[in-house]
Image (tube, rainbow, N blue to C red):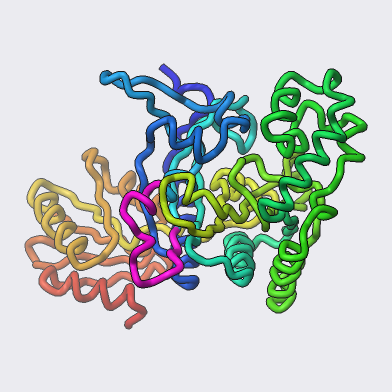
Amino acid sequence: MKAPRGTQDILPGTSEKWQYVESALIELCKKYNYREIRTPVFEHTELFQRGVGDTTDIVQKEMYTFEDRGGRSLTLRPEGTASVVRSFVEHKVFGQPMQPTKLFYIGPMFRYERPQQGRMRQFYQFGIEALGSADPAIDAEVMALAMASYQELGLKSLKLVINSLGDSESRKQHREALIKHFDPHREELCEDCQVRLDKNPLRVLDCKKDREHPAMKTAPSVLDYLNEESKEYFEQVKSYLDAMEIPYVVDKNLVRGLDYYNHTAFEIMSDAEGFGAITTLSGGGRYNGLVEDMGGPETPGIGFALSIERLLMALEAEGIELPVNEGIDCYFVALGDQAEKEAVRLTYQLRKAGVQVDKDYLGRKIKSQFKSADRLEAKYVIVLGENELEAGQANVKSMETGEQQEVSLADLVTYLKNKLAGGK
């Protein structure tokens, strides 16, 4: 039996890196006052059809959809925003006094894609959503948090790319210009783009098959169709990024792969050598109108999501080692049945006192037990044999200095806690 294609087992030795990264992201969210939300792994299929959009590759080709025994169509979540907005509306979070609502999530998502490095069919996303503010300053805050998500872990080869998709009026004019531009080339485009051209021509710009078509290079830019309000909004967003001294590049061709985006759109890319052909680390943008589509009141929103897998790839590409293999505090070496029983008791007492401790469970000889302590990088080894038991003492050895000390069993917990805290 093997794991399904596009999934992976995250084993000890690697899982610690995941834990470290996730803990760092959670601590970062606390600084920005974002609080955690946990949503179901599967939702009603309609949620993603309405929230993500019928014209997206995600809805058309990549969702894991099934019927339950009651005949209801359910889908494993392919992204996090739609679920967060659904929860925001269902629980009337918009009515709470503290606004905007600032949330983050970490969890598995599912898309039926061709598996490749950094792109799995079950993958893990960290994302944030800020709901309830149309202030350009919060757009800049979200991008600052996105950049900090990488910088706090030591990444340096980063590039923030931004664009404006404009408001509904600007997008309507741009849509008409795109249709006019691409219509003469309709038959030259892939089947998907021929459909997109009528339903959502902005998606044509995001096509992977037709990206080298000459018409793509001359397609009208949305920036040329921004009305004064949208232009001013975008200028304010850039001014806030400038104030925080966060470098960015404006890319007029940047569009996001989901239908709900408007105004600010952005991606963070890795410039690290050897990172791979697909350089995008994360992306996000503003989605005013999505809450209303979910049955809620008019509520602006903005967010982003990053792949934990691609974050770990970027760390590896830049040669950044996470401080995760720090060993354990103590290892118990016990010899003889009575000493073994006392070691079990003392191990339990040490753990209750907050000491990280392990012991042998295979009845190995003393030399093999010391080897286990070495492999676990134990700071101290506690040796308890029949002689030590009779004397009511244990031998405590520092693995760093080789120093040994006879310690009363009654004082063992206090002694080790003191040593581990840096005492003499």
Q: Quadrant of the N terminus?
A: top left
Which residue is drawn at the image coordinates 58% and 48% (left, top)?
Answer: 312
Residue 35 image point, x, y percent: 40, 63
**Relative horizontal placement of residue 82, taking residue 409 as reference (left or right):** right
Whether residue 52 appears in this view of the structure is yes
Whether residue 151 appears in this view of the structure is no
Q: Quadrant of residue 403?
A: bottom left
**In this picture, is 383 found above or below 418?**
above
**In this picture, is 278 found above or below 347?**
above
Q: Nearer the viewer, residue 222 or 142?
A: 222
Residue 77 image point, x, y percent: 45, 36
Q: Is residue 95 magenta?
A: yes
**Relative horizontal placement of residue 396, taking residue 346 as reference (left or right):** right
Residue 258 image point, x, y percent: 61, 41
The magenta region covers 86-103
Q: Nearer the viewer, residue 414 or 120?
A: 120
**Relative horizontal placement of residue 67, taking residue 244 as reference (left or right):** left
Residue 36 image point, x, y percent: 39, 58
**In this picture, is 9 found above or below 22?**
above
Q: Nearer the viewer, residue 250 or 96?
A: 96
Q: Quadrant of the C terminus?
A: bottom left
Which residue is drawn at the image coordinates 60% and 60% (left, top)?
Answer: 146
Q: Is residue 343 magenta?
A: no
**In this picture, is 90 found above or below 416?**
above
Which residue is drawn at the image coordinates 62% and 33% (left, top)?
Answer: 56
